[in-house]
Image (tube, rainbow, N blue to C red):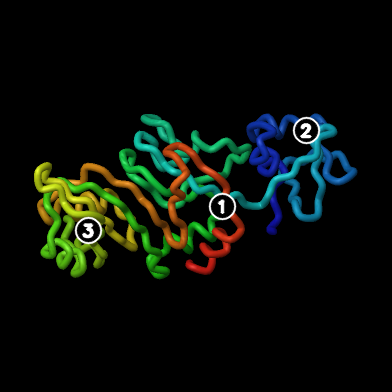
Amino acid sequence: MSLYRLDKYLADAGIGTRKEVKHYIKKGGIRVNDTIVCKSDLKINPETDIIYYGNQKICLPAFEYYILNKPAGYVSATKDNTAPTVLSLIDSRRKDLFPVGRLDKDTEGLLLITNNGELAHRLLSPKHHVNKIYYAIIEGIVDETDITAFQKGLEIGDEDLKTALPAELKLYQKPDFSKNLSYIEVTVQEGKFHQIKRMFQAVGKKVVYLRRIHFGSLSLPDDLLPGDYRKLTDEELKSLWEYS
């Protein structure tokens, strides 16, 4: 583990804001090992140093990993002034958690929450080709022409991404012709703004419901209701590193 600023470590552990923590340190309320410290920028190693707030031993794992079933209405960000963020659903003392990638506000499903920047970078890097699989309900009847168009890549009118990379589109179940609805799965390796919605717009159809069900080696658990979350298992975490 790399060295950690003392005030940041205490703030991430939920002891208080950075300003409050600095006040505690200045007043001699923090011990590192057996020594009272007065410098907020002191570098500590949580693997070898023991930090006390009063008589309370502070233990903060280096990294935390959560799988969240994101409900509609939440923003995939650490802060937002217009809507609640996905982090408001996570009961953690950490202050450095963030969502890995983003889901649109009205999109549901699997979202990884962590504070491990290296893993996030590997999962989001285009060169690692991490699959993201979505279940969607589409207004319009999806047919072989659409499947072929997705396989070739679609013009979606983005200055940064004029052509979406090839994607795998398949029917999840038979279309409902009476309601003009299709039920599909689509696999992409990108995560551009409103990408899947714009891909279907490009073939003259509309996404009316969207849920991410796979991200890399992770699958959305059947028993994880919208708004619920849990920590990753050791096996899930290992498979994510191996996948990326």
| Disc marking residue 26 | 2
User: Percent from the top left, x then y, of residue 141?
Assistant: 12, 52
| Disc marking residue 232 | 1
Earlier-in-chain disc, 3 versus 1:
3
Callout 3: helix, strand or loop? strand
Give me the residue at 26% from left, 65% from top.
168
Callout 2: helix, strand or loop? helix
Image quarter of the N terminus: bottom right
Residue that badge 3 annotates: 171
Earlier-in-chain disc, 1 versus 2:
2
Q: Residues within 10 Å of mark 2 (few under 14, many from 20)?
A: some
Q: Is residue 39 left or right of residue 178?
A: right
Q: How far apart in space, not on screen, are marks 3 and 2 (Cα)?
A: 63 Å
Q: How far apart in space, not on screen, are marks 3 and 1 (Cα)?
A: 30 Å
Give me the residue at 21% from left, 57% from top.
159
Disc 2 marks a residue whose amino acid type is Lys
Q: Nearer the viewer, mark 3 or mark 2?
A: 3
Rendering quarter of residue 60: top right
Q: Residues within 10 Å of mark 1 (few under 14, many from 20)?
A: some
Q: Nearer the viewer, residue 9 or 199?
A: 199
Q: Nearer the viewer, residue 85 or 131?
A: 131
Q: Is residue 92 left or right of residue 78?
A: right
Q: Nearer the viewer, mark 1 or mark 2?
A: 1
Disc 3 marks a residue whose amino acid type is Leu
Q: Residues within 10 Å of mark 3 (few under 14, many from 20)?
A: some
